[in-house]
Image (spheres, rainbow, N blue to C red):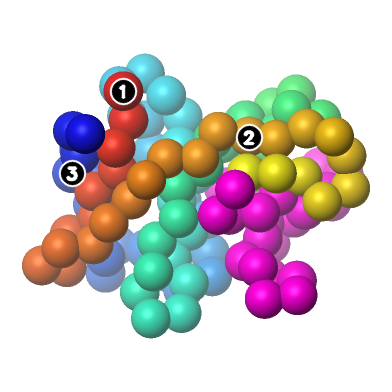
Amino acid sequence: MNFTYVCDISDLDLDVGAAALINGQQIALFKVANNRVFAISNWDPIGKANVLSRGIVGDLDGDFVVASPLYKQHFSLSTGKCLEEDVSVQVWQSKVESSKVFVAVE
């Protein structure tokens, strides 16, 4: 698996999304507690727009989620699955090493 350097961990704000373009893919990055970083597609399949990085981050039953800023559906940051609808978004593996954020995007 090839990881691509995206940014430094200090470039991401806690519980706030950021968008990145990696290998032609729009990725939404989210830093949560303990500097854990999630990478999901920025594409909201319900609202049909690249907006998930602008959503509100929360915790529902122990699962980190982002609420779409358009219609407020919740997407799991770990699985990409929507909690209210039968859709999901792509999830990419991410890691933080030496304060640098890497994402594995094909």
Residue 26 in percent (x, y) is at 46, 29
Tag 3 residue: 5
Q: Residue 99 in magenta?
A: no
In the rendered view, tell whether residue 93 sits above or below residue 16.
above
- Amino acid at circle 2: Val
Q: Visible in this render: residue 11?
A: yes
Q: Residues within 10 Å of mark 1 (few under 14, many from 20)?
A: few
In the rendered view, tell whether residue 10 sits above or below residue 101.
below
- Amino acid at circle 1: Glu
Left or right, 56 with reference to 90? right
Looking at the image, is mark 3 or mark 1 earlier in the sequence?
Answer: 3
Residue 30 in percent (x, y) is at 48, 58
Q: Are marks 3 and 1 in contact (CB under 8 Å)?
A: no
Q: SS of the residue at dot 1? A: loop
Which residue ends up furthest to the left in the rendered image?
A: 98
Q: Are marks 2 and 3 in contact (CB under 8 Å)?
A: no
The CA span between labels 2 and 3 is: 22 Å
- Amino acid at circle 3: Tyr
Residue at point 45% right, 55% down?
Answer: 38
Quadrant for the N terminus in the image: top left
Tag 2 residue: 89
Residue at point 18% right, 33% down?
Answer: 2
Q: Are marks 2 and 1 in contact (CB under 8 Å)?
A: no
The CA span between labels 3 and 1 is: 13 Å
Quadrant for the C terminus in the image: top left
Q: SS of the residue at dot 2? A: loop
Residue at point 66% right, 54% down?
Answer: 76
- Near-viewer residue (47 or 2): 2
Left or right, 51 with reference to 23? right
The residue stretch that appears in magenta? 53-79
Tag 1 residue: 106
